[in-house]
Amino acid sequence: MRPGDVVVGVLEGAVETKVRPAVVIASSAYLRERPDVLVGILATRPPASPASTDYCLRDWQAAGLRAESHFRAYVLTVHRSELTIIGHLSDHDWTSVKGCVGNAFAK
């Protein structure tokens, strides 16, 4: 598993827990040192009021997703055994997602 991987698993959302896709946002160092993974949720519905922490994936099909997807900085910590890798974000999408993550956390 590596940063920018697209994964699926039973993940908690703002409203319900269900099988959903997410993006691995943990650093390589974090992934080497820990059994868990930090992920950001991917949603098929665009946010009602887009924020600087939201991003509509441009290359969602190449990332292994079945529908247009939107990154949300809704961060979860999940054991890696509960996730399945289905793809990887394009360089363009990964750069944009990292920007959203940067906007979400204190510096």
Image: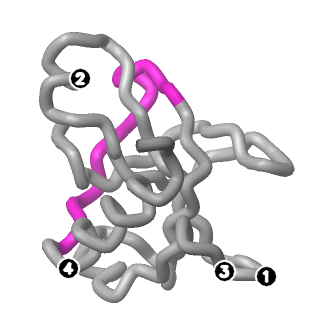
Q: Earlier in the sequence, mark 4 or mark 3?
A: 3
**Amino acid of disc 4:** His
Q: Residue 73: horizontal and vertical position, in percent? A: 55, 55
Identity of the residue furthest to the right in this view:
15
87 drawn magenta: yes
- Residue at 47% x, 59% y is 103
Question: Marks 2 and 4, how far apart in space?
Answer: 23 Å
Question: Marks 4 and 1, how far apart in space?
Answer: 24 Å
- In the picture, measured across the screen, residue 79 lies left or right of residue 75, that is left
- In the picture, measured across the screen, residue 70 lies left or right of residue 95, that is right
Q: Which residue is mark 4?
A: 92
Badges 2 and 4: C-beta atoms under 8 Å apart?
Answer: no
Q: Which residue is mark 1?
A: 48
- In the picture, measured across the screen, residue 104 lies left or right of residue 50, that is left
Give the extent of the magenta segment.
Answer: 77-90
Q: Which residue is mark 2?
A: 30
Q: Residue 85: horizontal and vertical position, in percent? A: 28, 46
- Please tell me how crowded label 3 is: few (under 14), some (14-19), or many (20+) other residues with Cα within 10 Å: few
Badges 4 and 1: C-beta atoms under 8 Å apart?
Answer: no
Q: Which residue is mark 3?
A: 50
Q: Earlier in the sequence, mark 2 or mark 1?
A: 2
- Please tell me how crowded label 4 is: few (under 14), some (14-19), or many (20+) other residues with Cα within 10 Å: few
Q: Nearer the viewer, residue 62 or 30?
A: 30
Q: Residue 25: horizontal and vertical position, in percent? A: 34, 45
